Image: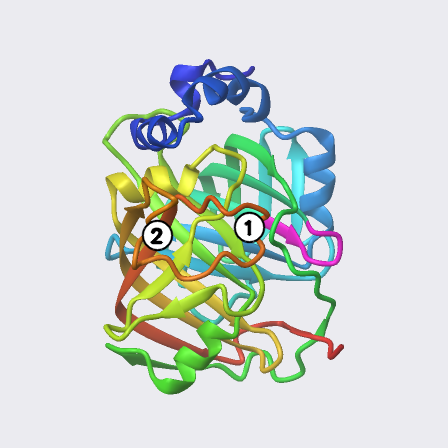
Amino acid sequence: MNNDAGVVWHKGEVTIQKLAGTYERMADIGPEFIREFMPQQHRDFFCTLPMIYIGYTDHISQTRASMLFGAANFIQSPSETELIINTQHSLGDYILDDIKVGGRVGLLGLEFETKRRNRASAIITEINQKNIRLKILQSFGNCPKYIQPKTFKHNRDYGEFSTSMAANLSSADKNLITNSDAFFIASHFDDGQQGNNRGADISHRGGSAGFVSINSKGQLLIDDYPGNGFFNTLGNLIENPLASLLFCDWYSGHALHIRVSSQIIWQHDINQPSPFLTTKIDTGSDQVKRTLCFTPSKVERLVNGLAYKQTLP
């Protein structure tokens, strides 16, 4: 059931892999690690999660990063190629009309306590008022790098939703961003073909608090730390620079959703650092080769959108 290398990676991923020097290795290991089904441990993992991150394209064709919440088993896996997710509890932004049968979504399961994470891309096969049924197109695990451990408790104020929109980041928004140790990015690739590697994706980016900086133009700058070499996100961004970022304020229970355009800035000579590079915290290497630059176009503040809060240290 494994894909061959030509199906595993789309052209944007191949482009970035070649630029980064991982292409030959990825051509060999891609079919081993990216499957058209979920191993049993992935199925069990998803079913025990109290929350899942989802990237999708909404009714105005904008890629969105969001979350769904529930008790254990709010996600079910009736087979190795299916997930059923209860969609009744979200950030408060989830609109049933945003998705449709045949739509493609990206999924990220992340367990902060154990630093375990698994990803999947899927196609919606059924929708009702409570659930979506998904057919898995690609499934793979991610390493625990750059995940900062957290423990959670229920947010008593969850559900008292309110939202506000802005064109620019406020000082409070900037403070949340520059003090965060993680954010989530939803990206999208679609060239009209039906390969399993098309559609929306969502991924985690993390580091020590301060790994995201904001320049005088209001752009977010994030060094691209060494990772698994897949370049799923950057492969999407080089083909489609429009994306969405989700920052969670786990202590308050609020969230910040930002629509952005993106740019990948390459540093070809480590002896002559690019002025765009910001920090090398937590990379484990002094060879930061890329910086992601995000320019916000729409800012959405989601009050009491998180069903869980982080417990104090």
Number of callouts: 2
Q: Quadrant of the C terminus?
A: bottom right
**Residue plotted at (51% across, 15% down):** 28
Counting from the top left corner in percent of width and height, residue 220 is at 34, 65
Q: Nearer the viewer, residue 282 or 111?
A: 282
Counting from the top left corner in percent of width and height, residue 18 is at 35, 26
Tell me the mark number nearer the camera, choosing from 1 and 2.
2
Please give left or right for residue 144 compared with residue 202 in the image. Answer: right
Q: Which residue is mark 2?
A: 273
Q: Is residue 102 visible?
A: no
Residue type at mark 2: give it: Pro
Residue type at mark 1: give it: Thr
Q: Which residues are magenta?
A: 109-115
Quarter of the rendering containing residue 76: top right
**Residue plotted at (51% across, 42% down):** 226
Counting from the top left corner in percent of width and height, residue 202 is at 46, 49
Give the vertical position of 99 relative to 238 (above or below).
below
Q: Is residue 230 magenta?
A: no
Q: Is residue 61 visible?
A: yes
- Look at the image and name its color scheme: rainbow
Q: Which residue is mark 1?
A: 283
For marks 1 and 2 on the same chain, the one whose residue lies earlier in the sequence: 2
Counting from the top left corner in percent of width and height, residue 310 is at 68, 74
Please give left or right for residue 279 compared with residue 295 in the image. Answer: right
Distance from the alpha carbon under mark 1 to that under mark 2: 16 Å
Disc 1: CA contacts within 10 A as few (<14), some (14-19) or many (>=20): some
**Residue plotted at (44% across, 26% down):** 22
